[in-house]
Image (spheres, rainbow, N blue to C red):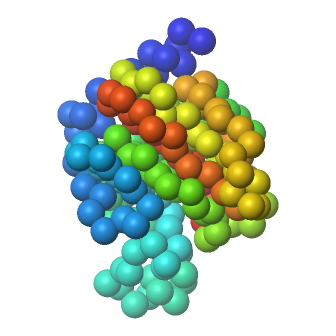
Amino acid sequence: MLDYYSDLAFLEAYLTEHFPIFPTTGNRLAITNGIRSQSLVLGVLKGWQYQPRDPRSRKQNYFLGKNMRKIEGWSLYMWLFDFTEKYFPNHPWNAVIFNKNIEYSIHRDRKNLKGTPNLVVTFGDFTGGNLAIYDDDKNQIDSIDARDGYAFNPNTFHSVEPFEGNRYSVVFYTC
């Protein structure tokens, strides 16, 4: 497990040094509590997430997100494939979102490819911030510490519990 945590420390340092993680202004699900919250999406995305300028991409319905056009995007994306192949070899994904200091309210990820799970990994210097899982009536049924990774059905209600400190999360999903 030492390699796993070393790889997460590398990822945190890489994101800090090489990548602008964009402010989450306008995200109706993000609760920031005065903390600078940020996120970044990489991957092969569906048109509902980002409107591409190239009309051919709209016809194909899938396209590379704008951050993938940079060499750093490709490098990170390929590193993440190696990371998931090493630690979570049975988890399919084609897109990933990085979050920093975001406390998401109760929601479902309804636009993911049906039948595919989300894989969330959290890291950083924080307390709290578990993944909360709810039943269909929005009653909390579980609280998961996702530091070691946790796969779940994205169509179930879920949120991020309050936390203190700097909390990063990486969510691998298929769209």
The reply, left or right, for residue 144 in relation to residue 56 is right
The reply, left or right, for residue 148 in relation to residue 141 is left
Q: Quadrant of the N terminus?
A: top right
* Rendering coords of residue 68 (x, y %): 36, 58
Image quadrant assignment for residue 52 = bottom left
Question: From the viewer's perspective, is residue 121 above or below residue 119?
Answer: above
Q: Quadrant of the C terminus?
A: bottom right
* Rendering coords of residue 73 (x, y %): 34, 50
* Rendering coords of residue 57 (x, y %): 45, 82
Q: Residue at x 25, y 43 (%)?
A: 35
Q: Residue at x 60, y 28 (%)?
A: 145
The reply, left or right, for residue 67 in relation to residue 5 is left
* Rendering coords of residue 60 (x, y %): 54, 83
Residue placed furthest toward the top: 2
Q: Nearer the viewer, residue 172 or 138?
A: 138
The reply, left or right, for residue 143 in relation to residue 15 is right
Q: Residue at x 27, y 63 (%)?
A: 25
Image quadrant assignment for residue 82 = top right
Q: Residue at x 50, y 55 (%)?
A: 105
